[in-house]
Amino acid sequence: MEINFYTTQSNQNDYNIYEYNLCDFHWKIVAFYVFAVKFVEKTKDLSYFKIIIKQKYRNIKNIMGNLFFYITSVIIITLIPGPDLIFLITQGLTKGRKEAVFTALGLSSGCLFHTALAALGVAIIFKQSIIAFNILKILGIIYLFYLSIKAYKNADKFSLETTSNQAKSGFFKGVLMNILNPKVILFYLAFIPQFVPKGTQKVGLYMMFLGLIFMAIAVIILTTVAVLSAKLNDILLKKPDLMVKINKISAFILLLLAIALAFTQN
């Protein structure tokens, strides 16, 4: 005689649910037991944790060391007299503090632009293609030549105040001065990747992080140079004849920069 313990269908369903939950609970106990056994096996010797801690410490130390060396290199590179720094000083001497500061911000923005090109792989085009390199070089020469002529024609035109339009003009001058130099693109392509730690998964993102650091340092240094050079502008404004000569000299310097760029090779 078969005994039926389930008087109703509801009792049968309740028992099935109970049995399923009990089985699931048993599997959780087994999984926890396996994890506990493996954990105990690995932690019998504390050297397992020591190895992990040493690896993490070594990675952090390498990253911080790279960043320190990178920041030091960027500071030195930014302070080395080059076309951008020379152009900024002439802006400070001839245009005053406000326009010079905006020029410094424009030049600094170019850092992020060039880093983005390097991170996206676009910069490699200018390294491998002579045509692309020469096109950008010609545009840079034309722009510098234009600035030289403009500076010479307006040598006797200067004022004590800088308008908002002049400030904006200074910013765009700085941006164009930086991005139209093909050698700068190749420099970022060679310089930035050196400081990306080995094993970095998101290389492009880390390169952009380095570019932001470069831009921040450039802003601090270049704006300081702009303010210091503009102090001489305050003195020169009291001597109109000398100011005209300085403006003509700045026009000649821009012409020399255009000539130097013309002899730049890939």
Image (tube, rainbow, N blue to C red):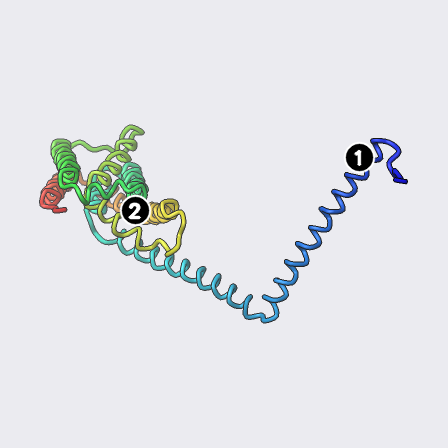
Q: Nearer the viewer, residue 148 or 141?
A: 141
Q: Which x, y percent locates residue 62? A: 40, 61
Q: Is residue 69 above or below residue 107?
A: below
Residue 4 is left or right of residue 190, and the answer is: right
Please tell me whether mark 1 sits on a helix, a strand or a loop. Answer: helix
Q: List the single residue furthest toward the top.
A: 165
Residue behind mark 2: 222
Residue 238 is left or right of residue 60, and the answer is: left
Whether residue 198 is visible, yes or no, is yes
> Label 2 is placed on what type of residue?
Leu
Residue behind mark 1: 13
How busy is the neighbourhood of tag 2: few (under 14 within 10 Å), some, or many (20 plus)? Answer: many
Q: Which quadrant of the figure has residue 174?
A: top left
Picture quarter with the N terminus: top right
Identified at 23% across, 44% down, the residue is: 124
Q: Nearer the viewer, residue 79 or 4?
A: 4
> Label 1 is placed on what type of residue?
Asn
